[in-house]
Amino acid sequence: MKTRVDIIDNRTGEPVAAELFDEVTVEHFIEAQQEWRPIVLKAARQLASRGSRDLVPQHFHWDWTVKAPELGVLANTFYGIRYDKKLQGLMKLETVGEFCRCRLPEQADRSLVYVDYVEVAPWNLKTLMVALGEKPLYSPIGSRLIEAAVLKSKEEDCKGRIGLHSLPITEQFYRQACRMTPVGRDSAKQNLLWLEYTPEQAENFLTGVRP
Amino acid sequence: MADKRTMTLNLTDQEMRLLEDLSARKDVSKTALLRQALRLYQMVEARLSRGEKLFFEDEEKKKAELMVV
């Protein structure tokens, strides 16, 4: 699957057509590791040396290449966004597994699509770029990936229900930009905050309705 | 979305009731539930074939190994 998604080039403020795809290969993982990780690590060191430890990206140690064995497993779906010949974001979804159960009381135990990993290229990461005194290059990459997760949930008959564990630094994004419902901290997953969409919230997110 | 192929599935009454109960509880269609089951089976098989073990853990952190044939 390849489809066009609009993103904003923040240098001009104009929309540009990027490509969302699900034929993710190990080459994309290697690209993320080679192109993104050195920038994230350099930024992490810069911020730590300035004493801005709370702004250090909490995913600086992620390594997409270790996920290569998961590529052929049907329970997993990977998405990428490409623009200007560069990978702008990557996401891993799970359609079955221990985290594919709703926790919100109103939809407890129903099936959902679990967003296991989302990462945007460091030059698009708002918290990181602002901390370094720059503007993110393209946006909203994270939102476009969450839209893809909601559409995958609908395709899997989960009606838009998705769930995820958020790193502390991205909680605000999922609560405020995505308007997901925070359900609680998960002691089984480093005490990360679990957030979830109901079908109505997912639809509002897709259509841009702000209730 | 990947192309899909159609097949006929013969189930006993008990199996059909189970399928209907589970699809109602999970709020997905019977087809979606069977596709989930197939993916789960593949995932479990892949990990077992790598020599990993499958456990369930209760609230007291007691583990019970699940035998898969």
Image: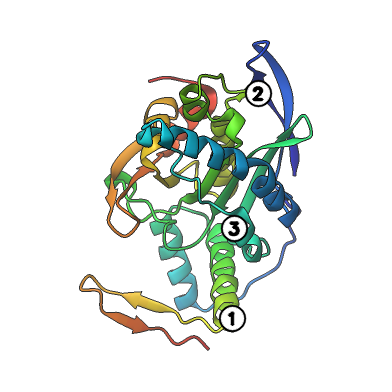
Vertical placement of residue A156 versus A204, above or below: below
Using the image as rendered, state which of residue A188 and residue B27 is in the foreground.
Answer: A188
Disc 2 on helix, strand or loop?
strand
Q: Can you tell which mark lies on residue A86?
A: none
Vertical placement of residue A187 versus A203, above or below: below
Report the Cα–Cα distance between label 3 and label 1. Answer: 18 Å
Residue bearing the label numbered 2: A7
Identify the amino acid type marked 3.
Answer: Asn
Vertical placement of residue B58 versus A179, above or below: below
Q: Can you tell which mark lies on residue A76?
A: 3
Residue at left 58%, top 61%?
Answer: A75
Report in which chain the residue with disc 3 lies.
A
Residue at left 44%, top 87%?
Answer: B67
Using the image as rendered, state which of residue B5 and residue B50 is in the foreground.
Answer: B50
Name the residue at the left extreme.
Answer: B60
Discs 3 and 1 share one subunit: no
Report in which chain the residue with disc 2 lies.
A
**Could you say which quadrant of the image residue A88 lies in?**
top right
The x and y percentages for residue A90 are 62, 43
Q: Can you tell which mark lies on residue B50?
A: 1
**Could you say which quadrant of the image residue B45 lies in?**
bottom right
Residue at left 56%, top 58%?
Answer: B32
Report the Cα–Cα distance between label 3 and label 2. Answer: 25 Å
Q: Quadrant of the C terminus of chain A?
A: top left
Q: In which quarter of the image is the N terminus of chain A?
A: top right
Q: Nearer the viewer, mark 3 or mark 1?
A: 1
The x and y percentages for residue A32 are 66, 46
